[in-house]
Image: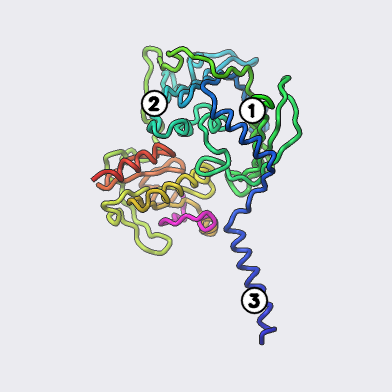
Amino acid sequence: MKFSTLPALMALSVAIQSTLSAQSPAKPVIEPAAQQKLKAMRTAYDNLRTYIATVETQMSGIEGGAPQVSRARLTYQRPRKVMLRTLPTAEAEIPEPFALPISLCDGERCYFWNPRGDRLKYFRASLPSLSYGREALMQHQVAGYLFTPLLAGTDLFAPPWGHTLKSLKSAPDTNIEGTPVEVIEAQIEGSSPKEAESLTYFIGRDDHLVRRIVDSTTTEGITFTTVETHRALQVNLDLPANTFEWAAPPQTDADDIGPQMSDPRLAMGERPLPFEAKDIDGKPFRFEEYAGKVLLLDFCASWSGPCRRDLPHLQQLYQTYHAQGLEVVSVSFDTERSEFDAFRTARAMPWRHIFEPLGLQGEINKRYQIRAVPFSLLIGRDGKIAAVNSRSLLLEDAIKRELRRF
């Protein structure tokens, strides 16, 4: 009898190990020499007072066309002032309004040009509270998604902001336009299971500042590459006091809201629109259950790259504030229940979940009219909407504010 059950026990053991392996991400392979170079690079940016560079960005792989090239002048002052000003390229002069800064953070607010039709508009957005220091730059990423993490002092490969690292290794040293550089290559988790992505940093051997960052993503047999090159570096200069003052031209419209991403009735101070749904355990969902608590209603999908990137921060918020009264309910717009279940199980999402099998075309979204995910509503202790589609640190600010109420 013992011998007859042995194969079954072995099969069960293999099945358990396979399940655990599927749910637990593999430990990254990190080469010590590459880790030291990465640490030196981060330290160099931690010690900057100011930074000025000409940044050229080249994007290729888009619809099989020629690479798209843009140039800009980047100016930074510690801890949270950044300006990006477009420069001409060989292909194009600078049309108005782009002779003005295309984006600017003055330490408290960020401004972005947003031309619409025949009117010149700009978008104003708050930065998170001063307590976040440099990290606040991650909120709007004015210096671009590749370079802002360095200025913001965040870990490139750790939650909640960093990529999920698969491997980190050194590549042969080289030089860029006469500057000797060390090279490290990182293989990271893509935005979806079907993507393969890598980041390569070309780091000045003497000053440990990057001269080039290459982001390469392959999906469905097509490779998209972004190459960001930094030239004419100037560091730790004394900048004029008015460097980061925003001055929009006369007759310019300001927009504090941005594009409408949902039914306009979902506004701060209003009550959320009720909807009928059951969670994945078959229990009906009702807003009344959360009276006196702070509820984050998170609309998401496993196929959405931004949702996957936001998840580590959402997990951190839940772990930090759940004991103080924060509840999270995720509404999944996945159309395949198996994909939703696999993602939820693998990523350890311990809060309540609602699965909408028709995705964005389902009954919930017929009421909410959400244009894209991720989308969120923060509902305060009084049952009224306290924040609409706030992300990252601004969302955390709102959560802390609502938890302190009453």
From the top left corner, tell me how far across and down residue 353 is, in percent.
42, 56
347 drawn magenta: yes
Q: Which residue is nearer to you in this view: 258 or 394?
A: 394
Other-residue count near label 2 (Cα within 10 Å), few / some / many at <14 / 14–19 / ≥20: some
241 shown above or below 45 = above
Cβ–Cβ below 8 Å for labels 2 and 1?
no
Q: Nearer the viewer, residue 392 or 218?
A: 392
Asked if residue 249 can be seen in this view, the reply is yes
Q: Secondary structure at mark 2?
A: loop
Which mark is first along the chain, 2 or 3?
A: 3
What is the distance, in whole Å, between disc 3 and disc 2 at their CAs?
62 Å
Residue at screen point 61% across, 49% down: 193
Mark seen at residue 208:
1
Query: In this image, 264 relative to 14: left or right?
Result: left
Q: Which residue is mark 2?
A: 108
Is residue 351 part of the magenta span, yes or no?
Answer: yes
